[in-house]
Amino acid sequence: MLMELLRLYHYWVFAMLLMIGFYAVVAKPNLIKKLIGLSLFQAAVFLLYITMGKVDGGTAPIFQPGLVNQVFSNPLPQVLILTAIVVGISTMALGLGIVVRIKEEYGSTEEDVIQEINRRW
Amino acid sequence: MVNWSQHLPVLQVIIPMLCAPLVALLQPRSFAWFAATATSLFAFVIAIMITTGVFAGQDYSYNMGSWPAPYGIELGVDAFSAILLLIVTGASALALLAGRSSLDTDIETDRQPFFYAAWLLALAGMSGILVSADAFNIFVFMEISALASYVLVASGGDRRALPAVFKYLIMGTIGATFYLIGIGLIYLMTGTLNLADMELRIHEVADQKPILVAAGFITIGLALKAAVFPLHMWLPNTYTYAPTIVTVFLAACSTKVSLYLLLRFDFFVFQPNLVNHDIQFSYYLMPLAVLAILIASAVALFEQNLKRMLAYSSVAQIGYIMLGASLVSLTGLTAGIVHMFNHALAKGTLFLAVACLATRIPEFRLSDVSGAARDMPWTMGAFVVGGLSLIGIPGTAGFISKWYLISAALGEGIIGIALVAVIVVSSLMALAYIWRVIEIAYFRTPKNSAVTLREAPPVLLAATWTAALANIYFGLVPSLPVSLSSSAAETLMRHVP
C-alpha cells in the first residue's frame, strides 16, 4: 500500500506544490508574494502535464532510420505546456506590472495598507 | 472559387486578432479608434452571417490547417455559440461606437492605440472560446481574453482600479488554472482534447473517479471566472472602477462567455458519461443560484455607489442564468440562455446610461445623480427603460426571460413554487433598487441647482437609446433570441441521458 502511494510520487509533488502556491496566494498579504504563490501554483500544473507524457522506457519522439520497436514518450503534453508556460509568463509580467503601478500610486505592496488607504480616501 | 461562408468561424477570431497589433501601431489616436470600431463592426457582421447560416442549417465544423478532427484543432459553431457571438460582437461594436468621447476623457491620448489593441484581443479571445471545439485551445483563448480584459480594466485613471484588477488577475488565473488541471486529468484518462471526441472516449474509461475530479475542477474554475456566487468577489470592484465603456463591454459579455463554456463542457462531456451527474449538477448549483439571486439583490439594495449597485445586480442576474441551467430541462436551459441575451441588453443599456452620466458627473455615489433627470432627460429615460427590462416588466426583453424561467420552474413541482417565490422576491428587490435611482434622479433637487448639466454627447446618447430600444424590440418580438436559445437548449439536452 505504502509502496503503491510512493510509486505515484509525481502526483504528490504536484498536489503539494499546488497547495503551497495556493496557500501563498490566499494567506500572504504582500502582493509580490501572492504572485510568487501564483507562479508555484501554475508550475505545479506544468509538472502534472509533463509527467503524464512520460512512457516507461520511452525516449524523445524523433524518428530515425533503422529504429524498430522503439517506445516513444508522448510529446503532446510538453507542447501544450510550452503554450501554458508562455501564458504563465505573460500573466506574471502583467501582474508585476500592476504591482509596480500600485506601488507608485499607493506607496505600498501590502494588501492591508492599500485597503486602509482606499477606505480613508 | 473559395467558399467564404465555410471560413466564417475562423475569420471571426483572426480578423480582430490580426487587427490588434495593427491598431497598436496606428499613431494618430483617432485612426486607432476608427480601425478598432470598424474591425468590431466587421466582426458583428460576421456573427450575423454565422447566425443566418445556423438558421439555414449550415454545418460550420472547420478543421484548422485541414488536420482531421480528433488530431487537429476543430472549430465549430452551433446555435449556442451563435447567440453568444451576437452578444459579444454586438456589445463590442456598440460600446466602441458609443464610447469615443467617454474613452477620450478616461484614457490618456498616447496610450489609446494600445488600449484599442487590448480591446480587440479581448474580443478575439472571447470569440475564440465561442468557436473552438478543442479544450486546450479554449484555455489559450480564455487567457488571451482575460489578460486583455485586465489591461482594459486597469487602463483608466482611477487608482482604485489597480487593486481591483490585481484581485481579478489572481482569481482569474486560479480559475483558468483549475480548468487546465481539469482538462489535464481528462487528457490523462482519454488521450484527447477534442470535446466531441472526449464525450465518446470517457465512455470507455473504466475508472470514472479522475473524470469526476476533473468535473469538479472545471466547474469550480469556470464558476470562478463566471462570478457564480460565492466566487464573485472580484466582480464588484472591477466593474466599479473600470472605465465605464469597458464596464459596458465586460458586463455584457465576459461572465457570459465563461457561463457558456461551463454549460457546454458540462452538458457535452460530463452529463452523458458520469452517473447521476444531472442530479449533482442541480444540487450543487441551484442553492448557489438562489443565494446569488437573493443576497446579491439585497446587497444592491443597500449599495450607495451606482456602478457597484449595478455590478451586484449582475451577480444576481448570473444567478438567474445558473438557476435556469440547474433545472436541467429544456425550458430551464432555454430560459438561462435567453437570459444571457436579455441581461446583456439590459445591463448594456444601464451601463451606457451610466457612461452618459459620467460625461457630466465625476463620481457615481447615488447622491451625486440627484436631480440629474432635470438636465439629462434622455439619459435618464434610457436608464429607466434598461431598469424596467432588468426588473422584467412586460414589453421589455427582461420579461421574456423571467417568463421562461418561471414556466420552467413551475414544471418542477414543490421546489418550483419556492423558486418562483425567489424570482418574484428578487424582481421586487430589483424594482426597489432601480426605483431608488429613479427617485433620486427625478424627484430630488440637484445638489447644485444653479449649475445646469448639459445632456450627454449625441453619439453616446444615440447608442444608449439604440440599446434601450433593442430592449423594447426584443421584448415585443423575441423570436430571434428565443429560437436560438431553444435550439441551443435542445442541442445541450440531447447529451443528457
Image (cartoon, helix red, strand yellow):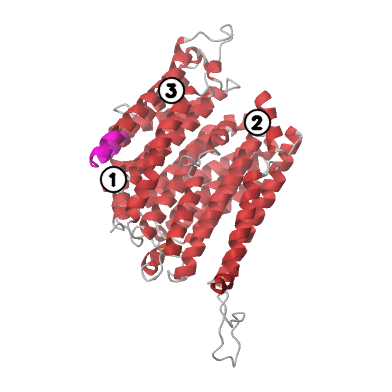
Which image quadrant for residue A86?
Answer: bottom right
Name the front one of labels 1 and 2. 2
**Closest to the observer: B192 or B93?**
B192
**Dot 1: few (<14), some (14–19), or many (≥20) neighbours within 10 Å?**
some
Tell me the CA gap for discs 1 and 3.
31 Å
Which region shows up in magenta? B402-418
Q: CA distance from mark 1 to mark 2?
A: 42 Å
Find out whether the residues at labels 1 and 2 contact each other: C-beta distance under 8 Å. Answer: no
Q: Amino acid at mark 1?
A: Ser
Secondary structure at numbered mark 1: helix
Q: Secondary structure at mark 3?
A: helix
Residue to which mark 2 is pinned:
B158
Q: Secondary structure at mark 2?
A: loop
Instruction: Please identify, in this view, whether the residue under mark 2 or under mark 3 is nearer the observer.
Output: 3
The relative height of residue A23 versus residue A54 in the rendered view (above or below) is above
- Look at the image and tell me whether residue B155 can be seen: no
Tell me the residue that label 3 is attached to: B433
- In the displayed structure, B261 sits above or below A10; it is above
